[in-house]
């Protein structure tokens, strides 16, 4: 179909930059379709915006318990920040 064309990472990055909104809509539509077809079990899923490394270290591997613990810490940090008027003591503490 592409006659053996292989775009390099810069070409792909540029395409993603130029078509970000359209790609977002395609992904949302795909997720909605999968939900309607019952393909998702609606389990807990956490995805960050990091670039993935080939190594799955223990520090970057989050089991369900660790995710709940992290979410609790984030909620407490948000509540603490709101109670102090949005001021924080520096560092991210996470």
Image: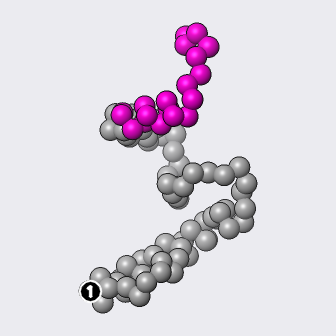
- Identify the image quadrant of the N terminus: top right
Asked if residue 43 is positioned above or below residue 17 in the image, the reply reads: below
Going by the image, does 56 lie left or right of 79? right
Residue furthest front in the image: 10
Q: Is residue 44 magenta?
A: no
Res. 60 image quadrant: bottom right
- Image coordinates of residue 74 in percent, x first then y, are 45, 76
Q: Quadrant of residue 5?
A: top right
Mark 1 crowd level (few <14, some 14–19, many ≥20, 10 Å Cα): few
Residue 25 seen by the camera: no
- Quarter of the image holding residue 18? top left
Q: Which residue is pictured at 51% across the width and 34% down the height?
A: 10
Q: Nearer the viewer, residue 89 or 94?
A: 89
| SS at badge 1 | loop
Quick check: 3 left or right of 61?
left
Please say whether residue 23 is visible from this viewpoint: yes
Does 5 sit left or right of 37 as displayed? right
Identified at 29% across, 82% down, the residue is 86
Question: 38 or 81: which is nearer to us?
Answer: 81
Closest to the observer: 24 or 44?
A: 24
Give the total of numbered labels: 1
Q: Which residue in the structure is indicated by mark 1? A: 85
Residue 90 against residue 70 in the figure, above or below: below
82 over 27 or under it: above or below: below
Could you tell me residue 76's position as x and y percent? 43, 82
Question: x, y percentage for residue 55?
Answer: 73, 54
The span shown in magenta is: 1-19
* Residue for point 37% across, 85% down: 88
């Amino acid at each position: 179909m592409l006659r053996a064309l292989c775009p390099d990472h810069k070409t792909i990055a540029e395409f993603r930059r130029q078509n970000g909104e359209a790609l977002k809509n395609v992904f949302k539509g795909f997720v909605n379709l999968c939900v309607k077809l019952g393909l998702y079990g609606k389990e807990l899923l956490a995805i960050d915006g990091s670039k993935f490394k080939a190594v799955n270290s223990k520090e970057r591997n989050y089991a369900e318990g660790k995710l709940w613990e992290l979410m609790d810490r984030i909620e407490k940090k948000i509540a603490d920040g709101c109670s102090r008027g949005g001021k924080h003591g520096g560092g991210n503490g996470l």
